[in-house]
Image (cartoon, rainbow, N blue to C red):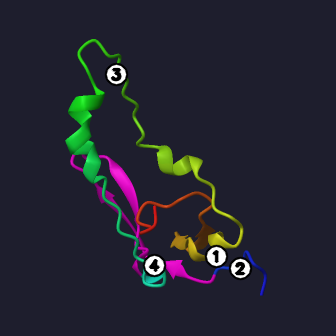
Amino acid sequence: MPESYPFCISPLQVDLNAKGKRRMIVDLRYVNAFLPHIRFRMMSLARDLANVIQPGHLLLSRDITQAYYVFYLTLRATRYSCFRWRGKTITGTVLLFGLSLA
């Protein structure tokens, strides 16, 4: 079987967010069941933030709502990022929202 051949086809749905905009939801629970659960907490941020940021420091903000689309999957990983839309099987090539390791 080729590395790019779909191995898992996850359920897909489209939902409306709070602003009424459509968003795609790929249900990756079946893929996530085989991934390790890595717990991550940034405990020092709340404790140290006041010591790091001082009055007069320049702060920037960045909208990262599209950040998932800049992380490309390896060919081997795309086998697990497939879903069906309108009768066609689509293979995700970028990080999909819902992957537990993301």
Determine which of the numbered discs, if any, sits on residue 37 in the image.
none
* Residue at image point 42% right, 40% down: 64
Say which amino acid is labelled 3. Answer: Leu
Left or right: residue 26 versus residue 20 is: right
**Whether residue 19 can be seen here:** no
Q: Crowdedness of circle 1 by 10 Å Cα count: few (<14), some, many (20+)?
A: many
Disc nearer the start of the sequence (4/2): 2
- Disc nearest the viewer among 1 and 4: 4
Say which amino acid is labelled 4. Answer: Pro
Q: Crowdedness of circle 2 by 10 Å Cα count: few (<14), some, many (20+)?
A: some
Tag 1 and tag 2, C-beta contact below 8 Å: yes
Look at mark 2 in the image and give the residue it sits on. 5
Tag 4 and tag 2, C-beta contact below 8 Å: no
Disc nearer the start of the sequence (1/2): 2
Cα separation, mark 3 vs mark 1, equals 41 Å
Cα separation, mark 4 vs mark 2, equals 23 Å
Say which amino acid is labelled 2. Answer: Tyr
Disc nearer the start of the sequence (3/4): 4
Disc nearer the start of the sequence (3/1): 3
Determine which of the numbered discs, if any, sits on residue 59 in the image.
3
Q: Is residue 9 magenta?
A: yes
Foreground residue among 87 and 32: 32
Cα separation, mark 1 vs mark 2, equals 6 Å
Cα separation, mark 3 vs mark 4, equals 35 Å
| Position of 41 relative to 58 (above/below) | below
The stretch in magenta equals: 7-29
Q: Position of residue 30 (x, y in %)?
A: 44, 83
Q: Position of residue 92 (x, y in %)?
A: 59, 64
Secondary structure, mark 2, is loop
Look at mark 4 in the image and give the residue it sits on. 36
